[in-house]
Image: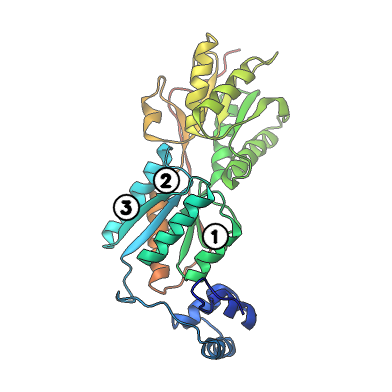
Amino acid sequence: MSEDEHGRITIRAIADEAGVSVPTVSRVINGRSDVAPETRKRVEELLNERGYQRRRSTRAPSRARLVDLVFNELDSPWAVEIIRGVEDAAHAAGVGTVVSAVHRRRASTEQWLDNLRTRASDGVILVVSQLASPILEQLRHLGVPMVVLDPSGGPTMDAPAIGATNWAGGLAATEHLISLGHSRIGFIHGPKQVLCSRARFDGYRAALDAAGLPFDPALVYDGDFYHQSGFDAAAALLRLPEPPTAIFASSDQMAFGAYEAIRQAGLRIPEHVSVIGFDDLPESRWTSPPLTTVRQPLAEMGALAARTVLEMAAGNDIDSPRLELATELVVRESTARLES
């Protein structure tokens, strides 16, 4: 039987001995009704036998007061949009928000966990591509409700997830370019370990297949969602013996980098190369020319994540373990019909 650093029996230990999941034990502890009677009895007996100590709180049990919003980094414009959505929903519910960045460093993550224990947050929204298993275990042991929010979330965190229809967005972007007569379409990939990156690429592939166009691996370059990688990938695409007539960058920031590579090559958008991005960041409409892109409802995703974690904190059921909000093609002036 495992214990935490204070010598207390953990929820994970109870779950392992009872042969059930950690959320099931949490539901029993919180008096939820959606547990089978036999399972409830077995878990309650173990809780009593092992002397499990429930978390003490001076707050009203049905009202959350604070949620944590956690990013890998805070240097992306889409982070601002997510924060705005979370803040709007939290403020409407009378709940405070704590924003943190763990910077993919264990020391930063451990410090955040220590702070989380101190303030006894009622819920955590994770906008991180991955967390080490021991960190996830500590979060589960704390019994704090968790929600994972794309675009950086992964499938292995055993928590409800809020995302967008990335595959459909990738499909729509590529279909738009094909409808304009483009058949050699370069693709700048996001980080391959991130689900949304792979979904956008799969949408690109699906659109090519549906149109009967061959997939050319030489037209695909890796990026990391940031400007420099978009610049480097676009510059490499333009150096090909037969360069693409259109480029689909799977983030707006990479599209902005592609703009500069095209300018330095002495070419014009969209006369020589059409460009399409993904995200619809606020600055997309102010580029020259304004960027055609796929709108990802980042603020709405943040608001939904906040409402979801607050529902969990109040002990309410979540209808679906994963919710996806629709993406939308936004056509501006960076894409044009291919002139023969």
Q: Is residue 329 above or below residue 105?
A: above
Which amino acid type is shown beneath numbered disc 3? Glu
| 265 with respect to 69 (left or right) | right
Q: Amino acid at mark 1?
A: Ile
Q: Eyeballing the image, is 315 above or below 223?
A: below
Residue 266 image offset from top left, x and y in percent:
52, 8
Q: Which residue is mark 3?
A: 87
> Is 170 on the left-hand or right-hand side of 75?
right
Cα–Cα gap, marks 1 and 3: 25 Å
Q: CA distance from mark 2 to mark 1?
A: 26 Å
Quarter that holds the C terminus: top right
- Identify residue for label 1: 135
Residue labelled with disc 2: 298
Residue 81 as seen in the image, left or right of residue 223: left
Q: Which amino acid type corresponds to the residue marked 2 in the rendered image?
A: Leu
- Of the two numbered discs 2 and 3 on the same chain, state the one appearing first in sequence: 3
Tag count: 3
Q: Residue at x 41, y 43 (%)?
A: 79
Q: Give 8 or 237, whichever is nearer the viewer.
A: 8
Determine which quarter of the picture holds residue 1: bottom right
How far apart marks 2 and 3 lie (CA) works out to 13 Å
Q: Is residue 243 left or right of residue 124?
A: right
Residue 117 seen from this side: yes
Q: Nearer the viewer, residue 250 or 83?
A: 83
